[in-house]
Amino acid sequence: MTLHTHQTAPTQYVQANGIRFAYRRFGKAGGVPLVLNMHFTGTMDHWDPLITDGLAKDREVILFNNAGIASSSGEVPTTIEGMAANAAAFIKALGLTQVDVLGFSLGGLVAQTLAIDEPRLVRKLVLVGTGPRSGEGMASLTPEAQRIFGATYDEPDHLWLKVFFTDSAASQAAGRAFLQRFRLRTQDRDPEVNEKVAPAQIEALGKWGAPRENPYDYLKQLHQPTLVINGGTDVIIYTINSYLLQQHIPNAQLILYPDANHGSQYQYPDRFVKHVSDFIAEAN
Amino acid sequence: MTLHTHQTAPTQYVQANGIRFAYRRFGKAGGVPLVLNMHFTGTMDHWDPLITDGLAKDREVILFNNAGIASSSGEVPTTIEGMAANAAAFIKALGLTQVDVLGFSLGGLVAQTLAIDEPRLVRKLVLVGTGPRSGEGMASLTPEAQRIFGATYDEPDHLWLKVFFTDSAASQAAGRAFLQRFRLRTQDRDPEVNEKVAPAQIEALGKWGAPRENPYDYLKQLHQPTLVINGGTDVIIYTINSYLLQQHIPNAQLILYPDANHGSQYQYPDRFVKHVSDFIAEAN
């Protein structure tokens, strides 16, 4: 086992479901690995190295691009269920029989579905900045998200200061530090996603968010110990949705961080790593 | 400094505001002590030794009976503000200039008020199983609380199995373990509260819970870093009130535990001690 980190782990490939999945794998081997599922239009390079390396101290961390994203081949499915099926195929192609799964935003929808569809494969679940089917304000982009994604920015990366952080001085300062960290890896970075990714993901998000009867009943099928984390003022997927997840998943713990928006884990990386590591280590 | 514990710390007394306050003090001296505020009709003996001794590993823990409770003299005020003023007088009478404050249920209302009224005295705040002024279902006892407090029990202590724990087998088992722990101290226990305590506390709870305009605005005055903790299905002070506290206190973190009622900290004492200790240790 080489001691790779977020910055040095080589991009590797594995074939499954007719897709060539790009992934990176690093950290302490021998236990149950943690598989991370990324947000809307994000790639492996959008994770915060403070978080991935922090989590990798006690376990293997596996980053991957789902089908059609950046260095992975194939097409982005237009359903969350399709994305979850591809994630399951990827994990099994690595020869793994049990993993913990973390999903952020869109990745949290994939992670929930994966956990329900593959109850033996997924041991524990961490849902970050995400929400349930037909969650509050999830039928389409929130008004705040429309404004933020529709604006122009001096530097393209500054979009993330608005998506992930609040307007407070402390949160914006944390955001600028995050932007530096997620650009630190210079070798072997992923290409940006192509122009087909956003429309397919938006179609999948729309189906997920559409109103339906008894929308949260499906969460009763989610039996894994689950940790739900978000900022207290998420304007992209409203914070109340994290509360709803906790209320409807049979065994879920909720943590909300102060003065934090959609990317609370990037604002409080040390706290987040501690909370996730403690949760994974707990007998529950 | 003698190495006292929850079980061995002697009951001491200090005079302030014309009241002789009973208290116990133990744990690691030298830092900022943590002062605990008890629930409706509770005394120092109702705390869980796993929690008090767990917290005392890294700091001094101070238990006390507020005015009119058990071994303390005086009358129970009929307002939360009166109780908070007495708590402040007690803390200052010990010669302390800065403390962290934890309050559970009724004690959480006292703790909020104390933190607002004494911003220099209170450094950090932990609010457990509690809610804001005019919180949801707080104008009077909830229907569930009426049923639970109105029922008869084979053993009086079994009331707490219903107040603090859910009906699940796991939660009830945790409850029975808690009942054993909080009876472990046999020497120098507090007397039960007299018959004037419950009516005065109920009057204070009624004034606190009464509907009013913009009820949560007062929380903007609470500038201490705050940790809000509760069970996900609190039927005594509904869980949504913990969410409301997080949403309206400027710097508050929320943690909700799964399958847990009003006494979630007694169900997960190890997790609770870790979360509170981490929060107090954080730079925030």
Image: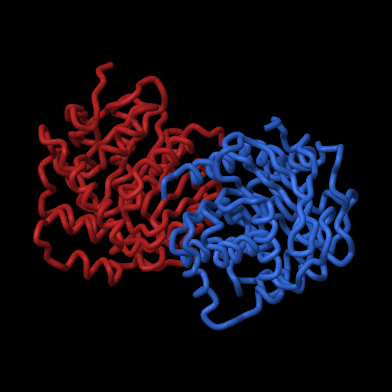
Chain colours: A red, B blue
Q: Which one is nearer the viewer's eye here, B261 or B225?
A: B225
Q: Is A17 rendered above or below residue B45?
A: above
**Quadrant in which the N terminus of chain A is drawn:** top left
Return the x and y of residue A241 as percentages of the image width and height.
43, 60
**Quadrant in which the C terminus of chain A is drawn:** top right
Q: Residue at x 17, y 27 (%)?
A: A10
Return the x and y of residue A77 as percentages of the image width and height.
24, 50
Query: In the displayed structure, does residue A119 sit left or right of residue B40?
Result: left
Return the x and y of residue B88 as percentages of the image width and height.
65, 61
Q: Is A193 rendered above or below residue B236?
A: above
Q: Which one is nearer the viewer's eye here, A45 or A96?
A: A45
Q: Does residue B77 appear anywhere in the picture?
A: yes
Outermost residue, bottom direction? B213
Return the x and y of residue A199 as percentages of the image width and height.
18, 59
Q: Which of the 4 image quadrants contains residue B8? A: top right
| Callout count | 0
Q: Does residue B235 appear anywhere in the picture?
A: no
Q: Residue at x 24, y 61 (%)?
A: A162
Outermost residue, top direction? A1
Q: Which one is nearer the viewer's eye here, A36 or B44?
A: B44
Q: Residue at x 85, y 44 (%)?
A: B189
Query: In the displayed structure, does residue A69 sit left or right of residue B30?
Result: left
Query: In the displayed structure, does residue B229 sit left or right of residue B68?
Result: left
Q: Which one is nearer the viewer's eye here, B221 or A179?
A: B221
